[in-house]
Image (cartoon, helix red, strand yellow):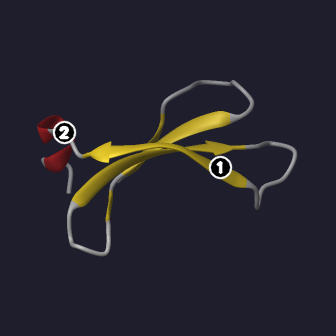
Amino acid sequence: MNRSLDDEDDPRRWLLLGFDPAGRILEPVVLVFDSDADAALLIHAMKARPQYLDTM
C-alpha cells in the first residue's frame, strides 16, 4: 500500500507499508521531492497500525 499524505506540498509525504528483514510489517513515511524525481528521504518508520493492515 502507498498513498500520499499531502495534497500539493513539496516535498510530498508518502505513507507506505512494507516488511523489515525479520518479517515485521512496518509503516514508513517517505518525503518525495518535486525537484528530483529520484530523490526520496525516509523520515519515519513504526510498527504498522491495525487500520492499515486491512489494506494489505
SS class of the residue under badge 2? loop
Crowding near pointer 1: few (<14 within 10 Å), some, many (20+)? few
Q: Which mark is residue 20?
A: none
Q: Residue at x 84, y 52 (%)?
A: 36
In the rendered image, which quarter contains the C terminus? bottom left
Near-viewer residue (45 or 53): 45
Which residue matches tag 1? 41
Closer to the N terminus: mark 2 or mark 1? 1
User: Few, some or many C-alpha atoms within 10 Å of disc 2 (few <14, some 14-19, many ≥20)?
Assistant: few
Position of residue 18 in the picture relative to residue 28 (left or right)? left
> Are discs 2 and 1 less than 8 Å apart at CB?
no
Which residue: 80% across, 42% down?
34
**For mark 2, what is the residue?**
49
Q: Secondary structure at mark 1?
A: strand
41 or 10, which is in the foreground?
A: 41
Answer with left or right where residue 25 lies relative to residue 34. left
Q: Residue at x 75, y 30 (%)?
A: 10
Res 11 quadrant in image: top right
Residue 48 point in image, percent of width and height: 23, 46
When the figure is inspected, residue 7 is found, relative to residue 39, above or below; the finding is: above
33 displayed left or right of 42 = right
Please tell me whether residue 32 is drawn above or below residue 25 in the rendered image.
Answer: above
**Picture coordinates of residue 35, whole percent (x, y):** 87, 45
| 3D distance between C-alphas at marks 2 and 1 | 21 Å
Can you give x and y, in whole percent of width and height, for residue 5 in the image? 49, 30
Q: Amino acid at mark 2?
A: Arg
Q: Which residue type carries mark 1?
A: Leu
